[in-house]
Amino acid sequence: MYDGDAGQLYTFLACSALTVSSLYNGGASLLRAANGLLNLFESDWGVSTEQCINVLVDMPSRLDGKDALQYATYTINQGQYQGQTILAFMGTVFSNIEQVVADIWSTPMSTDLMKNMANEAKDVAERLNPDFITGHSLGGIIAEMVCSMTGIKGASFGAIGAFDPFTKLDEVLVDAAGLAIGMTGYATSLSVMGYDEDDIEEHISNLNVGEFLIRTRYNGLILDTQHDDVEFEVVMNVHDIPARTIASIDGSACSHIASSCDLRWIWFGGGNVGTEKKLGHSSTHYVLNTNSKWTRGYEEKSQATIDYTKIFLPGVTKNTICDFCDRNEYCESGSCDLDKEKCLASNGKFPTKCPDDSATPGERSPCDGGSECSSGRCEIHPSGWAVLGYGLCYDGNENSDWCNEDTDCASGYCTLTFGCARKKNIGESCVEHDDCNSNNCNWWFQCS
């Protein structure tokens, strides 16, 4: 199990940059500048040239994939699969150097780092003997590789490398007509390379086309086919930028492990794929969308299977106030602010602060106006005015507290001397209608 930290990743990247920049006689200066910048932020990640020598000498042996695996097991406690176990492999933690290298280099280039991770994961699976195997992102391709080697059923979510080598073109190749054309071309290539015609004929007659495609189309990363005829679901978000970028050089929409193009596609993100949805790669949103809205294969979004009662697993509480939503069904209160994609309270408003059981406990609720806050007070002054902040709910100030407008006060009344006060009763002096409980200030400046 990996026990590294973000400082190790900085050390590795800084020393790698030093090595490259030293070719231009600027390495030491670059390192000093980086360390000086870190000191401004009181960081303890500074790196010396002596450390770099040790790191760069030692790093090749550390990038072998043998300390990069992270996993957990779960037991299903209800329903038809009660008592069965799931082995889940974790996706990339960006402080884990080996996992980052596995993402951007080892998976697409099929190097030993990724194969070592898969072999260790296979040993884990054989020792724990789970009923299902799964994973997200880097964990997803590990799950696919382990299931390929063991035949255990499972699923991958947003897996990098999930698509190749089985493309739509491959589906044509393995039908009768396409296969004949493809094998003729393959035989010609072998003949040009000098192989004997009889040997070529025997080789092709014994060739497993599916395995042939796997071996030749994915640089040998996936070599086993134990998953044949075993249940495996490949789930991919249409708008998943990281996974779909790394997944396939030829941009295919198919999977070796499903041996088809009938993947389960989900559709979260689209025009909004920022930090909340992590460029369409958020594991949380994969969970929320996999069963509630999905298509199969090349179906259009309009053909999606939709059942919003399946956003959450049975027994799982819906999202609380301030937590994510993009429709009312996500929220325990049944009310969602679609613009902010956050659950509201049962009164259709935000509390001043998010509750302790929310994803952001104690933080102020966002707002665009007082009508969105249960307190009626939203600080949205132009820059330079409000000290309290902008676009956040606040409790109204008590009487005699400072104010600069009526909405600052719990009473709804801010006096001309900038203090909160109770509103005036009938017969008391006033300046404007808002001064009065009756909301009526007559022409002789009395509430009536």
Image (cartoon, rainbow, N blue to C red):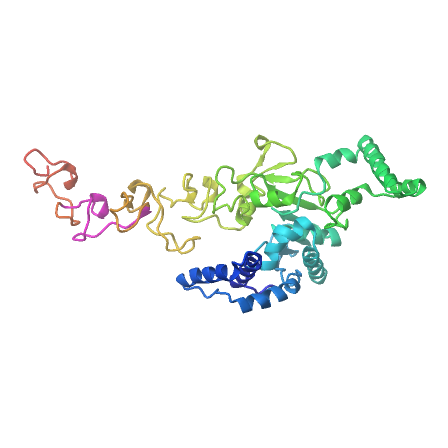
Which range of residues does the magenta coloring cover?
Answer: 392-415
Displayed quadrant of residue 305: top right
Whether residue 287 is visible here, answered yes or no, is yes
Magenta run includes residue 153? no
Q: Residue furthest right?
A: 198
State the residue at coordinates (45%, 40%).
328
From what the image shows, is residue 155 above or below residue 238?
Answer: below
Where does residue 62 sit, x and y in percent of width and height? 64, 64
Q: Residue furthest left?
A: 444
Magenta run includes residue 393? yes
Displayed quadrant of residue 19: bottom right
Left-right relation of 87 to 331: right
From what the image shows, is residue 276 above or below residue 44?
Answer: above
State the residue at coordinates (17%, 49%).
420
Image quarter hosting the N terminus: bottom right
Whether residue 76 is visible here, answered yes or no, is no
Where does residue 188 sit, x and y in percent of width and height? 86, 36
Q: Main secondary structure of the magenta part?
A: loop
Where does residue 281 sit, x and y in percent of width and height? 55, 46
